[in-house]
Image (cartoon, coloured by chain):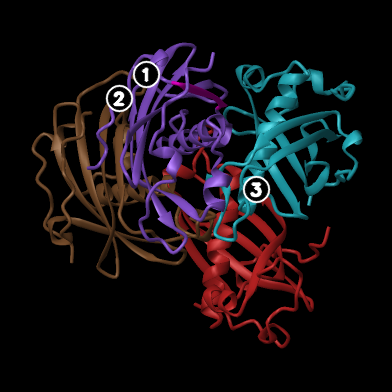
Chain colours: A cyan, B brown, C purple, D red
Amino acid sequence: MRIDSEPSLNPSDYEFSHTVRVRFSETDAMGIVHHSRYLPYLEEARVEYLRHIGHPYHEIRDAGVEMAVLEAFVQYRQPLKFDDVVNVNVAMGTITRATFQMTYLLTVDDEIRATGVTAHGALTTEGNATRLPDWFRDFTPPARAT
Amino acid sequence: MRIDSEPSLNPSDYEFSHTVRVRFSETDAMGIVHHSRYLPYLEEARVEYLRHIGHPYHEIRDAGVEMAVLEAFVQYRQPLKFDDVVNVNVAMGTITRATFQMTYLLTVDDEIRATGVTAHGALTTEGNATRLPDWFRDFTPPARAT
Amino acid sequence: MRIDSEPSLNPSDYEFSHTVRVRFSETDAMGIVHHSRYLPYLEEARVEYLRHIGHPYHEIRDAGVEMAVLEAFVQYRQPLKFDDVVNVNVAMGTITRATFQMTYLLTVDDEIRATGVTAHGALTTEGNATRLPDWFRDFTPPARAT
Amino acid sequence: MRIDSEPSLNPSDYEFSHTVRVRFSETDAMGIVHHSRYLPYLEEARVEYLRHIGHPYHEIRDAGVEMAVLEAFVQYRQPLKFDDVVNVNVAMGTITRATFQMTYLLTVDDEIRATGVTAHGALTTEGNATRLPDWFRDFTPPARAT
């Protein structure tokens, strides 16, 4: 397991937050959001994080680099329900030459619902591992948006 | 609306049938399969139909033709539930120079659950409308698989 | 086919509009939004429409009425792509004692991408058809939100 | 992190295997299966495993026990593509009084594509933690199906 970043349970440790409202189509017969549906929430928040720091995903792909998901981990602490407004807090985790991790804390009305970590690797469009874009090397997380 | 093919309510009017078992992840908080999840069932059955008639989707894409979905219609008659084994009956509908339609009848234990129709158009890989592959011109539906 | 409401191609004919941004997870290997993923967009816009007119979905369900999807139709005119900001325009269509229809026009930067219609029926929690809530009887669409 | 079971890279270490064929609707704009779509594959295989050992999910739910997903981990090693026939190998992992883990190895033509682990907890229908059904206490994995 490559993942070694630990998601904090304190929202103020995260430098970015993105809001999603739970769709009915994301619920399952237990009446809660299906566990597979958290990963698109993390991805949507990650895309907005990259836009926020001035490196939108389009720019990365236009530079010929794909960001493959290498690993994903989610801990489901309290269920999400239809129409919940979910704060997906995002922080950059460990960065190496060719990979980076991001950590996530999902809250609803300041209550913790889930945490997660994803690990990503840079790939050429042919699918071979490559270095991350240069800006990653000296990356400093932005101050928390308020 | 381009769709003019009418799905029969009689399984024996369909030349092909494909079975899917409902996944838990396809249910919603009403305890039934979410209405958006029928379209992947139709698509899976369509892919198997094309394989069955000797023209697998890979072959069509390798020939530089994409099959875009132009229209989709589903009528939900009785709900599908988790673990249901669904027979997706498929028949070719109206064929024109550049488009074709397919009709669908979904049954569980011989009970009708849904019908559907999809309309498809041939596109070049640049996204322009083009003629269907030649074999479509003289297409004769196969005898019903038993 | 129960659907008889016709979706207008003019956004100003719609009394409500809701915005969704396309997620990467909603795209497919053709590089566009998968056709099954439009229905959750329509549903999300429908939920916001009901909230907008003061009858949120929770209220309807709390009153013991489920709104089943009876039919759905989508016409795909131009593809949606990752990160597109989609305006989902919504209008109430035909209303009967036990059913209603809604029409949809999806645009990106004022360009038409898709239209749709859904038909819905009121059900008791046991799954039997029932009358729509009283407020539907005298429903007058709101003035268009601007 | 509760997960401590380690998925083996050797298919013969798994006592059960279930096959899924990749749907087009599960691919994304990178041309591969979206990373969120692996979890429904694991779930489908888990459901078949429980059926295989004589304790179908319906039976567990009928006994008033829900199996909540507590944690999920996936390692994506090589991409899955449209139409791939995927062997999802499943093994029971750590079992406690109230939780169990399962490990997964996904292969295509004997090539390793992904591994995963899920952790599950027994809940009453009110959502409170409860003991696993009795048969779990003395669970012995079945001999590998061949």
Q: Amino acid at mark 2?
A: Leu
| Secondary structure of residue under mark 3 | strand
Q: Is residue B60 left or right of residue A1?
A: left
Query: Spatial distance from mark 3 to mark 1, Cα to Cα?
Result: 31 Å
Query: Spatial distance from mark 3 to mark 2, Cα to Cα?
Result: 32 Å
The residue at the point 66 percent across, 33 percent down is A44
Q: Which residues are magenta?
A: C15-21
Same chain shared by disc 2 and disc 1: yes
Foreground pick, D57 / A62: D57
Query: Spatial distance from mark 2 to mark 1, Cα to Cα?
Result: 7 Å
| Secondary structure of residue under mark 1 | loop
- Residues tagged 2 and 1 counted as in contact (Cβ below 8 A): yes
Closer mark to the observer between disc 3 and disc 2: 2
- Label 1: chain letter: B
Q: Amino acid at mark 1?
A: Glu
Q: Is residue B104 above or below residue D34?
A: below
Query: Which residue is denoted by mark 2 in the rendering?
Result: B123
Count residues near mark 2 (Cα–Cα under 10 Å), then give few for <14, some for 14-19, many for 20+.
some
Foreground pick, D146 / B83: B83
Q: Is residue D106 above or below residue A69?
A: below
Q: Is residue D100 left or right of residue C60?
A: right
Query: Which residue is denoted by mark 1 in the rendering?
Result: B126
Q: Amino acid at mark 3?
A: Tyr
Foreground pick, C95 / D98: C95
Same chain shared by disc 3 and disc 2: no
Foreground pick, A29 / A141: A29
